[in-house]
Amino acid sequence: MRDANTLTPSQKASRPAILGWLLFDWACQPFFTLVTTFVFAPYFASALASDPVSGQSLWGYATAAAGLVLAILSPVLGSIADATGPKKPWIAACGLVLVIACSALWYAAPGQPSAIAIALVAFAFATVAVEVAAVFNNAMIPHLVPPDRYGRLSGTGWAMGYLGGLVSLVIVLGFLAADPVSMKTVFGLDPLFGLDPATREGDRITGPFSALWFLVFVLPLFLVTPDVPRSGMSLGQAARKGLEQVKNTVADARRHASVGRFLLANMVYQDALVALFAFGGIYGAGVFGWQAIELGLFGILLTITGTIGALIGGRLDDRLGAKPVILGAVVLLALVCLGVLSLGRDTIFFVVPTAAPTPDDGLYGSAPEKVFVLLGLVIGSVAGPLQASSRSLLARLVPAQEAGRYFGLLALSGKVTSFLAPLAVAIATATFQTQAAGPAVLILFLLVGFGLLSGVRRV
């Protein structure tokens, strides 16, 4: 008799089981929304680092270090998980590291001599943990739905994630994080729990908040979503087999033209996307001087468009195929980078002067700010389809029983050079002493990714 908690590729999951899987993205997203992009990262650049330029550089180095570790761990652990069978124990282990690292961000307080080190190390550990956990979660896709629904499942997962990010962002900015000048939240309220705006406790609480959110909402995955059956292999045997599988997987991908070329393309365009999200909030804070209200509303708008884009993208994926969806998203992201590069405090499109904003102009009062917001909405709308179609494409290309090692390789291809784009942005920013160097670097990454994916024939 089949164990009720396991599922083979030929047995598809119930709706509650699928919902449990979808909630993984919901559980993880506050870390990306609150810590990586819209609240903690701008706080780090504006309040912990000596200036926004050095803050962007340091954040880039931490992102690069995390990417390098992920490049080593993801395919190996994915292969070991394939050999042992179940994926949820690995998700639990990664989740424990994520919770501890996120909680440590609370101690990165202004004026503390170790604050910068705490922030960067905890951020890097949390990034590695959440991304490795995603490898195992992604490897469950072929065990949940038939191939003709991979795109919809993947897209719905990303949409759930964006929605979770939106809800968490509204909670933090509306009730917890206050502007250090006005001492009020975005809703004009005093922060809950007596959080002190002067010491930026509302910004720092995003770490423990993300940890608690993950603990609560990842539970359905463990309670109602079936796992892959155990193989009966010991961990030591699985480790040896896993390492051997990594070699075989790389060799298979090199022989399999569609898989190999896709993984190379994914390697490049995912690097650019990681850097775009890592530096989006920092760029707004540094170039335009945005504070909590502007950054918070910007994040809310992006997550709304991201949710809509992921839902639409998943259905376009099933109807048109993954490749057209990915190519279209990459083109739009390259145009966005060019648009961001053309903006200054008082210019748009490189040379067109604009009037300085007045107090009566309200939020995003200047023309460059308005254009930056519009470009951000484009990023939000295409990021979900890009990532969702990437994992659905791979799920269609590889055997279900080997999904873990291939998704490990997908994570490898998405992370093996993920330190390069942030590192290139960090070096360019430090060298040219301008945050505009960032989007210039990313355009090149996106163009190379587009060229590689264009050559993929089997989709």
Image (cartoon, rainbow, N blue to C red):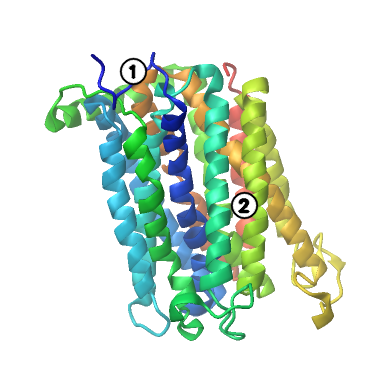
Nearest the viewer among 428 and 119 is 119
Badge 1 density bin: few <14, some 14–19, many ≥20, Cα 10 Å: some
Please give the label number shown on residue 303.
2
Q: Earlier in the sequence, mark 1 or mark 2?
A: 1
Visible in this render: residue 56?
A: no
Picture mark count: 2
Secondary structure state at the residue bearing disc 2: helix
Q: Is residue 293 above or below residue 448?
A: below
Nearest the viewer among 433 and 413 is 413
Q: Which residue is under mark 1? A: 8
Badge 2 density bin: few <14, some 14–19, many ≥20, Cα 10 Å: many
Nearest the viewer among 403 and 21 is 21
Cα gap from disc 1 to disc 2, whole angstroms: 34 Å
Dot 1 and dot 2 residues touching (CB under 8 Å) = no
Q: Quadrant of the N terminus?
A: top left
Amino acid marked by disc 1:
Thr
Secondary structure state at the residue bearing disc 1: loop
Q: Residue at x 86, y 70 (%)?
A: 353
Amino acid marked by disc 2:
Thr
Nearest the viewer among 66 and 167 is 167
Q: Residue at x 38, y 45 (%)?
A: 218
Q: Position of residue 337 (x, y in %)?
A: 68, 52
Q: Is residue 228 above or below residue 70?
A: above
Residue 195, picture quadrant: bottom left
Q: Position of residue 163 (x, y in %)?
A: 57, 48
